[in-house]
Amino acid sequence: MTDFPLPITAWAALVLGTLFFWLTWRVIGERQSGKVAHGDGGNSELAKKIRGQANAAEQMPLGLIVLGLNELLNPTWVTILLAVMLVAGRVIHGINFTMPGTPFIMRPIGMGLTLFSLGFGLIGLAAGLIL
């Protein structure tokens, strides 16, 4: 195996990319079963899955950028903690949006973990730049 400069971020990107692929696949499946080509066609389950995928597309890129920059500037344990929070948050959040019958509490837990990862990552990034 070759040395990769950002192994923790790479693993997080692999997991999050796989999750995004799964979220996309769930939207496609719901579109096909409901025969909806554009929008949500008034299908509330499709609307929920579309929103879950869109939320992932909104949150994952910045989370990975902040994670990668922290990996370059800060101790490994900081990056691992941020990666675990980001990945766990996105997985929990994604499950809530795509699996019918999941408890609503999963959504705020997933988003909370995502925001903690981003917030602490930004603080770590600022500290790494200043110090």
Image (spheres, helix red, strand yellow):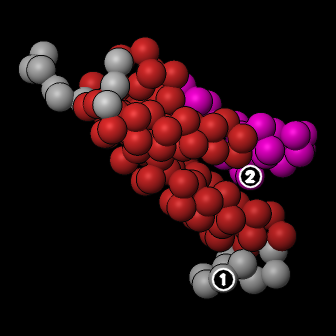
Residue drawn at x 80%, y 44% is 108
- Name the residue at the front extreme: 131
Looking at the image, is mark 2 or mark 1 earlier in the sequence?
1
Q: Amino acid at mark 2?
A: Phe
Q: Amino acid at mark 1?
A: Gly
Secondary structure under the numbered disc 2 in the rendered image: helix
| Residue annotated with mark 2 | 97
Q: Magenta residues, as a range?
A: 84-110
Which image quadrant is residue 102 in?
Answer: top right
Marker disc for residue 39: 1
Residue 71: x and y in percent read: 32, 29
| Nearer to us in this view, 87 or 46 | 87
| Nearer to us in this view, 35 or 90 | 90
Q: Is residue 54 visible?
A: yes
The secondary structure that most of the magenta stretch takes on is helix
Q: Is residue 109 magenta?
A: yes
Residue drawn at x 9%, y 20% is 2
Secondary structure under the numbered disc 1 in the rendered image: loop
- 17, above or below 61, in the image: above
- 107, above or below 91, in the image: below
Q: Quadrant of the N terminus?
A: top left
Which image quadrant is residue 128 in?
Answer: top left
Residue drawn at x 44%, y 53% is 62
Residue drawn at x 43%, y 15% is 77
Residue 119: x and y in percent read: 57, 42
Nearer the camera: disc 2 or disc 1: 2
Q: Quadrant of the C terminus?
A: top left
Residue 129: x and y in percent read: 31, 39
| Nearer to us in this view, 12 or 129 | 129
